[in-house]
Amino acid sequence: MTLLSIDWFLIIEKLILIAIIIFASLGIALYTTFAERKVAAILQDRPGPNRAGPGGLFQPFADGLKLIMKEEIIPNTSNKFLFVLGPALAMTAALMTCAVVPWGDKIVAFGRTVVLQIADINIGILYVFGVVSLGVYGIMIGGWASNNKFSLLAALRGASQAISYELAMGISLIALLMITGTLQLGEIVKQQMQPGHFWNIVYQPLGFLLFLICAFAECNRTPFDLPEAENELNMGYHQEYSSMKLGFYLFAEYVNMFISSVIMATLFFGGYDIPFFDEAAHANWGNWLALAGIGCLMVKVVLFIFFFMWVRWTIPRFRYDQLMNLGWKSMIPLALLNMLITGAVVLWLNK
Amino acid sequence: MGVTQILFWFLSALAIFSAVMVLVSKSPVHSVLWLIAVFFAISGHYILLNAQFLAIVNIIVYAGAIMVLFLFVIMLMNLNKETEPQKNLWMKLTGVVSGGCLLIVLISLVRQATEIKDKIALTNKGDIGLIKVLGKTLFSGYIVPFEISSVLFLSAMIGAVVIGKKD
């Protein structure tokens, strides 16, 4: 079926895939908020939310309902359009990254082979960087449009934190790219799946550590959650926000956490690769193999999300000057060193 | 009309509209935001030409870094229309005349350039804009200019640090 020389089936297929991935990301982020409260409760030796539903399972819906039902206040001195655009941008930027992630191998359905990736573009990792660098705008526009000096200061701090750690993140990944020789995320996963080839964490331990720390900083998670350091700047860049707009800002943090866990699992931990299992030898399993791969990716992601929470409820927050010192004086030199060593080793092995 | 053409007209209209809004907007912050929209439209054009690397670098460098710094400066200095000095009429007039001269020069250059005369842009195919080809070209044929420009960037960076350092 072609009309306007467009392959409509392809578009429908991609639309369904996009809808599934977006809703799955939002759903997982929704339950991440619940998991965060439960993990905090376990670490602090208390039961945690347990009233709504069995074991408190409906708690996230109750929270969401509460946020939506609250009164929505827009300060009348602020720019209304930008005030609404801020949280929308934060949320969009958080969700856009999932377009290039390979969620699994191919699935055959209704006679069509569906690749479980929205777009396997040539510049996969750079696309991720592009989207990450746009995440700053949600914070900055929201903070500025609130027309509140505290919001503005917090927004500028948040934005400078994000752009400082983007640098180290980029340089730490250059070393990985030297080894893989490709920017396509699908290709990177396939390389790690080959028998006899370990996951990239084995080749790039320092690169992974740097990337992990930068991911914490980019998601504004403790110990880097200065943009919302309530004892220093009231509440942060979302001080003037209420109701669901505040909800979107807070929720974007959880979506970011989920997506960065996926990216880390994909780049360094083999993505949808099932450990100690040769996928190529069991290709006749078809769809079940692909589903098992998705499940495996999700297990890795859940472990990462748990690590995010574990750190949050264990380590105190940095002071602002400590944060900047760590970013510029430790992370970037270490990332550069990692890049140089990797480059030298690659050259030496290829001589 | 194929997808490419629809996208081309949409992106072109978006780029021109946003560029006009950059000039017309009263508030500098709005101008910067419209300028970001221009960069996105231009990146869309690059993607239509299958120059993916150029498109994403345009977004990372211009929309993601330089415009953020613009916003920083404008927000910190708290520029708004009340404090912006009004230029007098003659200044505006000379600005329009010199801008128009530049436009004429550019248009005549594009019309007469033999390299692009009677050529049709390759859309959706051709791998000249892909990162592999681009990297090989940069590091073989154009290695000297590439390295010189990187040294230039480095010196600019060191210069900025030296100027910014309190003594």
Image (tube, coloured by chain):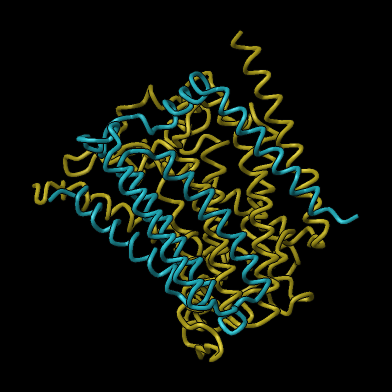
Residue, far top = A351
Residue, far right = B167
Quadrant of the rendered image containing residue A314: bottom right
Q: Is residue A49 left or right of residue A83?
A: right
- Evaluate whether residue A335 shows in this view: yes
- Evaluate whether residue A47 shows in this view: no
Image location (x, y in percent) of residue B125: 26, 34
**Number of residue marks:** 0
Q: Is residue A315 left or right of residue A123?
A: right
Image location (x, y in percent) of residue B31: 48, 69
Identified at 65% across, 23% down, the residue is A343
Identified at 52% across, 31% down, the residue is A275
Front one among B158 and A52:
B158
Front one among A339 and B38:
B38
Shown in cyan, the chain is: B
Front one among B128 and A220:
B128
Quadrant of the rendered image containing residue A206: top right
Image location (x, y in percent) of residue B37: 42, 61
Image location (x, y in percent) of residue A278: 44, 24
Quadrant of the rendered image containing residue B73: bottom right
Q: Quadrant of the C terminus of chain B?
A: bottom right
Identified at 62% across, 64% down, the residue is A36
Shown in yellow, the chain is: A
Identified at 47% across, 47% down, the residue is B58
Q: Is residue A199 above or below residue A31?
A: above
Q: Is residue A258 left or right of residue A218?
A: left
